[in-house]
Every structure is written in structure tokens, then in C-alpha cells.
Amino acid sequence: MTFDRSSELRFETIPLNFGSGKIPSLGFGTLIPDATETRRATRSALEVGFRHFDCAERYGNEREVGEALQAKLKADGITREDLFITTKLWNTNHRPERVERAFEASRNRLGISFIDLYLVHTPFAFRPGDDYDPRDEHGNILYDEGVSLIDTWRAMESLVDDGKCGAIGLSDIRLQELVRIYNSARIKPAVVQVESHPYFPQAELLEFCKQKGIVFLAFAPLGHGTRPGPLDDPAILAIAKEVNQTPAQILLAWAIQRGTAVLTTAKTPARAQENFNIRAIPKTAFDKINQIQTRQRLNAVVETGIPGFIPKRS
């Protein structure tokens, strides 16, 4: 890892071993249902200093994120090269002939010519089509048995070959599935994005990623609003008081100091500022967090392919 401008964690970056460029360790997640709120939150994140933006076709707001980014690029002298933009291929587009079309649609909605990182949103293929959530008459998800994850991955590799994106990776994946793709891939996964926090540290997956040079990118680092959750943990609260930081800042610092990148979503300027202004915690505090014994997965997406944090749309 390198520090681009200072020793502060908020400016740390991680080089991509299987792709081009560096990914900022502290990123902004754009899973925000309301369009107006998406634009406002994205602008605020840019203003406080976030440069890594995590998007997805399935979030339904790529266009709004893109509009906010473009407005700030024009107004504030921020260049496209200053930004690292990720988006994701949804489950209904896993068939190889659908991958490039889905990629181009995301690129057009975001209003950019180059995507830094393109992820397979989940390892599950749903029935192809325009319905994000295809179900039968009994309400059961309709999966697509006619395509494998390696088929999809080959099409993802072609996007890198064509110079359309800098790197490719996987989201919401288990270790055994990652190992299969890693061993079969011509272009290895540059990044793996998964749920991770002190209640669900995913130590075995993290160790594999470190051994293979894959960036481990944590989402839901604050527990995604679950109460009680990591933000309420007695150990976190005690450390926050001791070092005069907020519990959120402690959790984000812990994530980066254990060698991962991390995503955080903030809907207000004050919260964005809080989440950006993080600094390293002492080793004693870091070790105390590692000793937390609570184990709780918050999102069952790895079992079904349905991200539980995405609100259902009518």
C-alpha cells in the first residue's frame, strides 16, 4: 500500500495487481434509493474529498450519480483522472452476449468513457431479460442454468482486452467460488467486494486475497444500520471515547488498517465529512477489535443472489 499525499488513512491507495491504476482505500457507496438524494449525496462526497465511487446497474441510479460527478468535474476543477469509478453487472446479464451491452449501458448512464473497475454483482445468473427480479407464479427467483460464472468471466475479460475498463472483479462471492474463478481466469480478479465488519471479518477470504494480490473491498463496514450492531459494540464505543473519534471512524480505520479497502455511504454532508476524516487507531485498539467474538452476517445475498440492502421496487 502507498500513501499518496499524507499519512492519513483517507488518502491511502492500493495498486491493482491485475489491472490498471490504484483504488482509493476509502470509497463512497451509492446505494441510495432516491434520485434527488443520490445527486446531493454524491456532490457532498466529492466536496469533502471522496474520489472512489461504487455504483451498480441494479441500484437504479447510475444516471444520477453520473450527473452529479459531471457537474462537479466542470465546476470544481476535479479531473476524471482524479476519480476511481466502479460499477457492476447485474444477474440478468450473465450470458456472454449480454455482458458488453450491459457494460455500455452503464457507461452511458454514468456519462464516462472509461470504467475503472467492473464487477460481477453476484455469482448467481437470473433469467435474462429486462426484469431485474424475475420470479415464477409462486414468487421463486428464476435462475439461468444455461450459463456458468466462468462463461460470464470470459466476457468480462474481453472488456479489459478492448481497453474499456481498467480491471474486473467479483462481488458477493464465497471463498470456494473465488478460488474456482481465480484458477480458471486468464485475467485474474483485481478486486473482491464482500460484506465485512468486526462481526463478520471474513478472515479466511481476506487471507486468500492477500496471498494472491487481490484487493479485498468491504461493504457494510458500519453494520448497515443494524442496531444493535458494530456501532453499538462496547469495545468500539470504549475505543472511540479513548481516542476522541466516532464509532464510525473507528470501524472505517480498522478496516483500512487490516489491509482492506472499504465503502461507506453518507446521505448528509456532515456524515460524509465524518466518514472521510478518519485517522489511524493505536495497535492496542486494533487488537481489541480483532478480539470481538460476535459473528453476524447481515446480508444473505451469497445464498440467493438477491442483495438484501436494495429496497424492493414496485
Image (cartoon, rainbow, N blue to C red):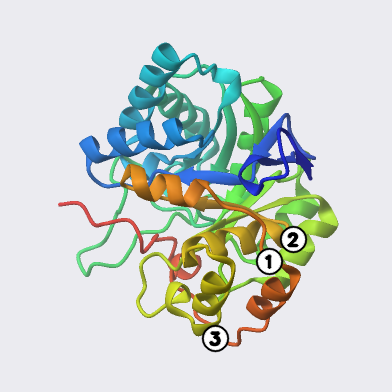
Residue 181: image location, x then y, percent: 71, 53
Q: Amino acid at mark 3?
A: Thr
Residue 245: image location, x then y, percent: 52, 62
Q: Is residue 225 above or below residue 88?
A: below
Total numbered circles: 3
Q: Nearer the viewer, mark 2 or mark 3?
A: 3
One can see residue 254 in this view: yes
Real-space Cα separation, disc 3 to disc 1, in angstroms: 21 Å
Q: Amino acid at mark 2?
A: Val
Q: Kindly indicate whether the residue at mark 2 contacts the one at mark 1 (C-beta within 8 angstroms).
A: yes
How busy is the neighbourhood of tag 2: few (under 14 within 10 Å), some, or many (20 plus)? some
Residue 117: image location, x then y, percent: 60, 35
Q: Residue at 51% across / 54% down in the picture?
A: 122
Say which residue label 2 marks.
179
* First reached walking from the N terminus: tag 3 or tag 1: 1
| Badge number at residue 175 | 1
Q: Amino acid at mark 1?
A: Leu
Q: Secondary structure at mark 3?
A: loop
Say which residue label 3 marks.
294
- Residue 269 quadrant: top left
* First reached walking from the N terminus: tag 2 or tag 3: 2
